[in-house]
């Protein structure tokens, strides 16, 4: 799953699609000037978001016509919410959506020439039914601001057919947020953790493999403290009975103060890597088979 600036998306079931965040029916909505539209095609993305993220988004500079979310330029967005109100105007249908993190208005412009008058009642439903009040819907569009009030100019809005999509969307929006705010969660952080573990092991006797390796070859998680790594290495490399090692033996083997050993042991227990045996101060590795 690649959430980089080249983030590509599925169409989420929308007719007309959004392959890579490109043109979708209705994107010629009122109020978009030609320069903004021309600029956006080259860098368009489609990002899953929550309404709170839309309300918290900011312009990178006063003249910008796009918004930043998690320090990343955001053009087209998609989100899921419950429709609290529908207002039919002469030129648009306005929906008020709530996703539990906030509320925002969504405007679908009525274009009788492009859609043969079908959207006047359906409100951009994309041929999959009509959005109704208190029902759930997915929206695709662009965040806009007018008179200091934000709304989404929607390309498509369609009712939710499978309510699992509501939870799925929130999970995906969270995953994308974590990617941009903390970096890739698996490959980069894991590699960094492995590199840190190897360097620490080399500085403490050259036992890199022992310090990094966990039960059954499991790597210690990125962010594990140095004290916990030393405690883990001491338990793993010191000869012992099936009762494990007492904290005093661990302190001697690891070259740590008792307080550091206890802190490191608590951390490893919370990670599920060691357990107590004959008493609370005697620890052994939790071996994971398979």
Image (cartoon, grey):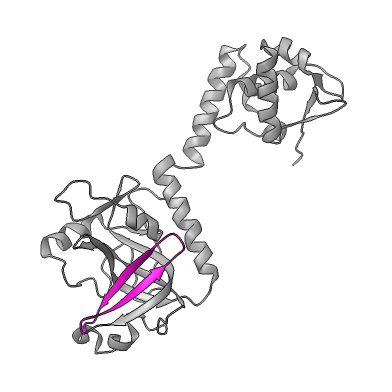
User: Residue 102 lies in magenta, yes or no?
Assistant: yes
Residue 183 seen in the current view = no
State which quarter of the image contains the C terminus.
top right
Please tell me in which quadrant of the rendered image residue 33 appears: bottom left
User: Residue 227 lies in magenta, yes or no?
Assistant: no
Location of residue 209 in the rendering, given as x and y in whole percent from the top left corner: 63, 23
Location of residue 220 in the rendering, given as x and y in whole percent from the top left corner: 62, 31
User: Is 168 in front, or is 85?
Assistant: 85
Q: Is residue 139 above or below residue 211?
A: below
Please tell me in which quadrant of the rendered image residue 146 appears: bottom left
Q: How many marks?
A: 0
Q: Is residue 286 left or right of residue 65?
A: right
Residues drawn in magenta: 90-111
Location of residue 120 in the rendering, given as x and y in whole percent from the top left corner: 28, 87
Q: Residue at x 16, y 57 (%)?
A: 39
Q: Residue at x 21, y 85 (%)?
A: 90
Q: Is residue 4 left or right of residue 237?
A: left
Q: Residue at x 25, y 90 (%)?
A: 117
Q: Is residue 249 left or right of residue 53?
A: right
User: Is 76 in front, or is 134?
Assistant: 134
Q: Main secondary structure of the magenta part?
A: strand
Q: Residue at x 44, y 65 (%)?
A: 99
Q: Is residue 144 left or right of residue 266?
A: left
């Amino acid at each position: 799953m690649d959430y980089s600036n080249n983030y590509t998306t599925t169409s989420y079931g929308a007719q007309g699609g959004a392959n890579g965040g490109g043109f979708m029916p209705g994107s010629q909505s009122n109020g978009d000037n030609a320069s903004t539209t021309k600029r956006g095609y080259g860098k368009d993305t489609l990002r899953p978001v929550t309404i709170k993220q839309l309300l918290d988004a900011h312009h990178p500079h006063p003249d910008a016509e796009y918004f930043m979310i998690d320090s990343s330029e955001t053009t087209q967005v998609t989100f899921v919410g419950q429709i609290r109100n529908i207002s039919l105007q002469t030129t648009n249908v306005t929906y008020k959506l709530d996703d539990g993190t906030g509320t925002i208005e969504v405007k679908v412009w009525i274009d009788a020439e492009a859609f043969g008058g079908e959207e006047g009642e359906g409100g951009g439903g994309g041929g999959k039914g009509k959005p109704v009040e208190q029902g759930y819907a997915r929206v695709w569009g662009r965040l806009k601001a007018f008179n200091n009030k934000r709304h989404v100019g929607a390309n498509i809005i369609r009712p939710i057919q499978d309510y699992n999509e509501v939870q799925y969307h929130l999970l995906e929006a969270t995953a994308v947020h974590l990617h941009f705010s903390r970096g890739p969660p698996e490959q980069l952080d894991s590699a960094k953790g492995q590199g840190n573990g190897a360097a620490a092991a080399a500085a403490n006797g050259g036992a890199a493999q022992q310090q990094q390796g966990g039960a059954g070859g499991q790597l210690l998680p990125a962010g594990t403290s140095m004290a916990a790594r030393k405690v883990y290495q001491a338990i793993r490399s010191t000869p012992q009975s099936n009762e494990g090692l007492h904290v005093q033996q661990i302190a001697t083997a690891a070259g740590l103060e008792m307080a550091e050993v206890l802190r490191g042991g608590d951390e490893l227990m919370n990670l599920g890597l060691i357990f107590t045996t004959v008493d609370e101060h005697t620890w052994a590795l939790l071996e994971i088979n398979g």
